[in-house]
Image (spheres, rainbow, N blue to C red):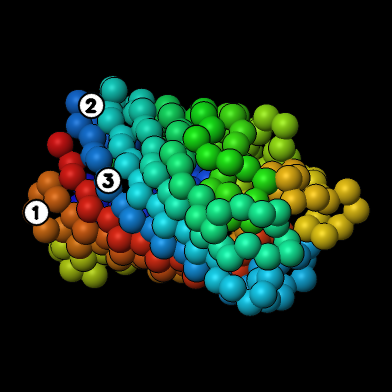
Amino acid sequence: MKRFYLVAVAAVAFVLSYGASAFASGSAWLPAPGEGSVTLSYVWQNADEFYKGSVKGDTPAGEDLTQHTVWVNGKYGVCDSVAVDFQAGLARGSFITGDMIPAKEEEENGLADINLGVTWRIVDEVVSSGPSIAVRLGGTKSGSYDTGYINSIGDGADGFEFSGIIGKYITDRIALSAEAGYRYRDEIPNNMFLNLSGGILLMDKLGVSVNYGFTNAESGLDVGGPGFAPDRFPETEEDIHVLGPALSLALSDQVSLGASYGRVIDGRNTAASDIFSVSLGYSF
């Protein structure tokens, strides 16, 4: 069963590809006590279309909206049923200044939001007939960047999140997982989120997964709608649906490579991005 952790790593790489506003993902499969992993990921997002409200159209002046992020993500098993995790990174967002934003440098650089979390596994499928079940509580500290621009690398909001997670090995090579939760954000719309993943171990060292992620803000402004102004970008109702595959290849018992692609297939007040990521993982 432990070898299927490759597929879980691929799914994590995909979730990281949400960009600099992403949060550490939850998993019902925890590292053993005293063991853990560290993953270095590079994420590139690019879009020439943008959802203004729920209507998709070209970005202002037809210029590409891009973002580059380098993430460091880690997890450590505290005891048999508890693990802690962290996520931190640096990001750069770029866009040619246009009518949609005030005068601003075309590139925005900064420290991305930092997320810390703890996961408690309530049920372990190894010793039960059902799936593994866990709950996660995480906290977010906003990074160092300017907000209020279309190319801002985050919303600049502190907050916390909680989620329920379920995972099941259908066979020793096929697994399914799901995470559903809620994020509270300071002074910007709260949101619900859902992550689904199905993975298969094709060979002893190669895992592939198909992943879907959904984030739904409870309320907020529409870009270009009543009350909207460029400096109120963080207050928009941002909904995102992302779908795509991920791969993970074990180079040794401790080192693995990952790659993923995601496409924003629907959304509201968000970029219609293509999202690519590559990652290097080390287990200890």
Residue 115 higher or lower than 100, as above or below = above
In x, y percent, where is residue 19?
Answer: 48, 53
In x, y percent, where is residue 60?
Answer: 68, 70
Q: Nearer the viewer, residue 248 or 100?
A: 100
Secondary structure at badge 2 equals loop
In x, y percent, where is residue 23?
Answer: 49, 42
Identity of the amino acid at label 2?
A: Pro
Identity of the amino acid at label 1?
A: Ser
First in residue order: circle 3 vs circle 2: 2
In x, y percent, where is residue 59?
Answer: 66, 71
Q: Mark 3 highlights which residue?
A: 39
Q: CA distance from mark 1 to mark 3?
A: 15 Å
Q: Are marks 1 and 3 in contact (CB under 8 Å)?
A: no
Mark 2 burial class by Cα count in 10 Å: few <14, some 14-19, many 20+: some
Left or right of 89: which side holds 80?
A: left
Q: Nearer the viewer, residue 249 or 2?
A: 249
The residue drawn where x is 82% and y is 60% is 224
Identity of the amino acid at label 3?
A: Thr
Q: Mark 2 highlights which residue?
A: 33
The residue drawn where x is 15% and y is 63% is 204
Q: Are marks 1 and 2 in contact (CB under 8 Å)?
A: no
The quarter of the picture where the C terminus appears is top left
The residue drawn where x is 60% and y is 29% is 159
Q: Mark 1 highlights which residue?
A: 252
Residue 254 higher or lower than 244, as above or below = above
Q: Nearer the viewer, residue 126 or 78?
A: 78
Q: Is residue 278 visible?
A: yes
Q: CA distance from mark 1 to mark 2?
A: 21 Å
First in residue order: circle 1 vs circle 2: 2
Q: Quadrant of residue 125?
A: top left
Secondary structure at badge 3 equals strand
